[in-house]
Image (cartoon, rainbow, N blue to C red):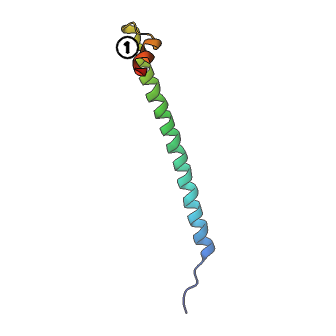
Amino acid sequence: MARKANYKEKISAIEAKIEKKQEELKKLKAQLSSLKTKKADGDYKELTEYMLANNISAGDVLAKIKK
């Protein structure tokens, strides 16, 4: 006689795996967001330092970009 599959256990196991992966994904998204924020902060700092060192205003930068 063929062995009867226990679908309830298999479904529960897969659902548990999905939940675990969703938690991992959530953590990875948080890390990504944090890294993007740190990069943006660093880029902004670099830009403002350059502007101060070269006596350039935000208006000057915008005028050059819009040309």
Q: Position of residue 39 (x, y in %)?
A: 43, 29
In this rendered view, identify the residue nearer to me: 9 or 27: 27
The quarter of the picture where residue 54 lies is top left
In this rendered view, identify the residue nearer to me: 60 or 9: 60
Indicate the quadrant containing the N terminus: top left, top right, bottom left or bottom right: bottom right
Q: Position of residue 41 (x, y in %)?
A: 47, 24
In this rendered view, identify the residue nearer to me: 63 or 32: 63
Q: Position of residue 31 (x, y in %)?
A: 49, 39
Is 60 left or right of 18, judged from the image as shown? left
Residue extending farthest to the bottom is 1
Disc 1 residue crowd, few under 14, some 14–19, many 20+, Cα 10 Å: few
Indicate the quadrant containing the C terminus: top left, top right, bottom left or bottom right: top left
Q: Position of residue 21 (x, y in %)?
A: 53, 54
What SS does tag 1 mark?
helix
The residue that mark 1 highlights is 50
Please say if 29 is above or below 47. below
Is 15 left or right of 64, judged from the image as shown? right
Q: Total label count?
A: 1
Residue extending farthest to the right is 8
Give me the residue at 40% from left, 12% from top: 51
Please say if 7 is above or below 55. below
Residue extending farthest to the top is 55
